[in-house]
Image: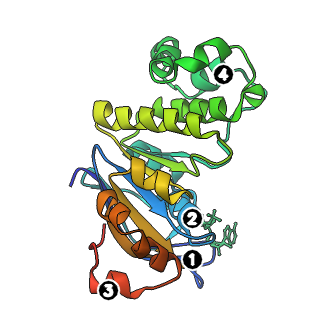
Amino acid sequence: MNGLTIRNLSTGYFPQRPCVRGVDLDVEKGTITCLLGPNGAGKTTLLLSLAGLLPRFGGEVIVDGAAVAAGRPRDAVRSGMVLVPDDRALFRELSTVDNLRLAVHERRRRSDAVGEVLEYFPALEKRLRVAAGRLSGGEQQMLAIGRALLQRPKVLLIDELSMGLAPVIVDEILSVLRRLVEEREMSVVLVEQHVRLALEVADRAAVLVHGSVVLADSADSLGRDPGLIERAYLGDTTMARTGIGGVL
Ligand SMILES: Nc1ncnc2c1ncn2[C@@H]1O[C@H](COP(=O)(O)OP(=O)(O)OP(=O)(O)O)[C@@H](O)[C@H]1O
């Protein structure tokens, strides 16, 4: 399959106590998948593991048919998985333009880097010389996503996209993500706290509870039956086993 395939993934902070267990997920190229779930369910842990920042205790991760080595950030990026973490990890003292240029290793691409990002986030044009730490929350998120784009991701992983942002800014960023998956043949995995927002933007969604996927389906189907998601949040783990919606 083209896109991201996760099979039976277990990960976490201590091998004897994995906090993500046996996760299966298929994210097709050109689509957006939202990971939902209560606090502490393991959503961030899953993204960190995909980005090679946490070890894998078991399972497989495959991007466009090629297996990705575990626990090595450089290999994860080479395979096409790029993470925008929840703290955005910008160089706060450096300008917008320098944050972008630093993301590009090939010298010949450096001069085009800014233009490439402004094509998607024109709001950054007036802020190019401003230190990243002085940008608004929305501008910082645009810069963080723009910088990730320069790595030419096949799968863009975004943690807590909407956290602390005004709804109008979130809408703007989400419409850029929709454009990106359509124009760039990439896919996006979003961790999102707001269920309604997630179902509006995503093609598919999965609910993680206590480290396991308990429910997964197309966003349209899940949106038609909000009670399902509510039950999943409350820990009704029979849903995955009975196959409601299937496994992503
Ligand atoms: N650095 C860490 N060391 C040990 N355990 C951790 C660490 N970070 C998170 N955990 C634990 O891992 C589990 C999963 O946490 P994680 O942050 O992945 O959940 P989450 O679904 O992203 O939650 P939230 O929505 O609150 O961010 C939780 O039990 C959490 O306490």
* Label 3 – label 4 distance at C-alpha: 47 Å
Q: Earlier in the sequence, mark 1 or mark 4?
A: 1
Residue labelled with disc 2: 45
**Residue 101 higher or lower than 52, as above or below:** above
Left or right position of 236 against 216: right
* Label 1 – label 4 distance at C-alpha: 36 Å
Give the residue drawn at x 31%, y 47%: 31
* Label 1 – label 2 distance at C-alpha: 8 Å
Question: Could you say which quadrant of the image residue 48 lies in?
Answer: bottom right
Q: Nearer the viewer, mark 2 or mark 3?
A: 3
Q: Nearer the viewer, mark 1 or mark 3?
A: 3
Residue labelled with disc 1: 19
Q: Quadrant of the N terminus?
A: bottom left
The amino acid type, in three-letter code, at marker 1 is Cys
* Label 1 – label 3 distance at C-alpha: 20 Å
Q: Earlier in the sequence, mark 2 or mark 3?
A: 2
Residue labelled with disc 3: 241
Residue 6, percent from left and from top: 35, 65
> How many other residues sit within 10 Å of disc 1, few (<14), some (14-19) or many (≥20)?
many
Disc 4 + disc 2, Cβ < 8 Å:
no
Q: Quadrant of the C terminus?
A: bottom left
Residue labelled with disc 4: 96
* Secondary structure at numbered mark 3: helix
For the question of whether residue 180 can be seen, the reply is yes
The amino acid type, in three-letter code, at marker 3 is Arg
The amino acid type, in three-letter code, at marker 2 is Thr
Question: Could you say which quadrant of the image residue 241 lies in?
Answer: bottom left
Tell whether circle 3 marks a residue whose Cβ is less than 8 angstroms from ligand 1: no
* Label 4 – label 2 distance at C-alpha: 28 Å
Which image quarter has ligand 1?
A: bottom right
